[in-house]
């Protein structure tokens, strides 16, 4: 399923997810890691908050209006070029002081920004719908694109059917990497059984690998087949963040009375 077409399934909830984010200025993509992306919009090496705001508005419009990649590029590229945030430039790492040559704006980077933000927002929006309807449709099917561009592990997970509450989905809900095109399909019990699911079927074995964030030194365990920074479920992680925020507000209210 093409991203532009699939995204139309849950634009409202995806937009709600995206608009709850704050901002974060980062130099490398590892500076904002895993579920931190649920709380903040960021673009690596975009330190100008005004330019970051312009980029966010463009992504917001892509979500709300269903813009294609080419429409998104046409919308934001002139702004980036006018600001000088385009091509390869010398940049200074604020953490180390090192001066390096880095790619700022480019067709490739705009594609990554577009696809990653829309795919993650759509996944979170879809998960909100899944939670609302899981009483009637309590199963999910992992849906990989069957072609030579699909990662071997993702191809192995294709057609995996598990209950929505299975812990496997905490790590394996797409997107599971840069340019990942996988998705999930919600199924009723009858549909799951018709496709071969039996009660007690176990999730695929998960082998973990150790990843050391080169920016922070933090060590995390990531399932094999999932890129660093993608080992979380956008929908459930934002739910946790909102619950934490609500709990903090309740505590502040009680402390003040």
Image (cartoon, helix red, strand yellow):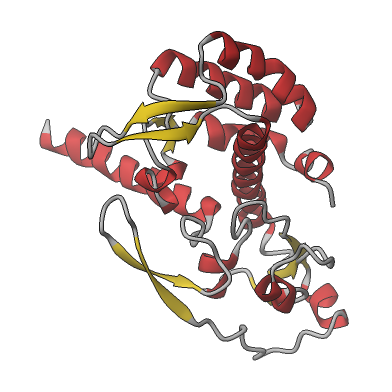
Q: Nearer the viewer, residue 181 or 196?
A: 181
Question: Residue 249 in the image: x percent, y percent?
Answer: 26, 36
Is 170 left, or right, of 139 in this rendering?
left
Is 178 left, or right, of 256 in this rendering?
right
Q: State which quadrant residue 195 falls in.
A: bottom right
Q: Residue at x 27, y 36 (%)?
A: 98
Can residue 257 be seen from the camera position used here?
A: no
Residue 192 vertical position relative to residue 186 in the rendered view, above or below: below
Question: Residue 175 in the image: x percent, y percent?
Answer: 62, 55
Q: Residue at x 61, y 41 (%)?
A: 121
Q: Nearer the viewer, residue 185 or 148?
A: 148
Can residue 145 be seen from the camera position used here?
A: yes
Question: Residue 216 in the image: x percent, y percent?
Answer: 26, 52
| Number of numbered tags placed on the structure image | 0
Residue 60 vertical position relative to residue 122 in the rendered view, above or below: above
Q: Residue at x 84, y 52 (%)?
A: 1
Q: Nearer the viewer, residue 14 or 49?
A: 49
């Amino acid at each position: 399923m093409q991203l532009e077409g699939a995204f139309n399934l849950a634009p409202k909830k995806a937009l709600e997810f995206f608009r709850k984010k704050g901002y974060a200025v980062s130099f490398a993509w590892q500076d904002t890691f895993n579920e931190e992306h649920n709380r903040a919009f960021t673009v690596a090496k975009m330190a100008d908050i005004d330019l970051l705001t312009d980029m966010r508005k463009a992504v917001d419009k892509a979500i709300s209006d269903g813009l294609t990649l080419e429409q998104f590029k046409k919308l934001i590229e002139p702004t980036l070029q006018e600001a000088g945030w385009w091509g390869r430039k010398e940049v200074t790492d604020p953490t180390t002081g090192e001066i390096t040559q880095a790619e700022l704006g480019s067709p490739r980077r705009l594609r990554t920004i577009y696809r990653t933000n829309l795919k993650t927002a759509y996944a979170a929006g879809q998960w909100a719908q899944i939670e609302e309807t899981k009483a009637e449709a309590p199963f999910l099917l992992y849906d990989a694109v069957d072609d030579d561009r699909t990662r071997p592990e993702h191809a192995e997970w294709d057609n995996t059917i598990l209950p929505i509450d299975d812990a496997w989905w905490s790590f394996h809900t797409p997107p599971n990497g840069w340019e990942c095109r996988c998705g999930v399909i919600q199924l009723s019990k009858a549909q799951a059984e018709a496709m071969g699911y039996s009660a007690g079927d176990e999730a695929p074995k998960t082998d973990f690998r150790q990843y050391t964030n080169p920016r922070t030194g933090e060590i995390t365990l990531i399932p094999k087949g999932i890129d660093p920074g993608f080992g979380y479920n956008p929908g459930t992680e934002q739910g946790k963040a909102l619950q934490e925020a609500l709990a903090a507000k309740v505590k502040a209210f009680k402390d003040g009375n």
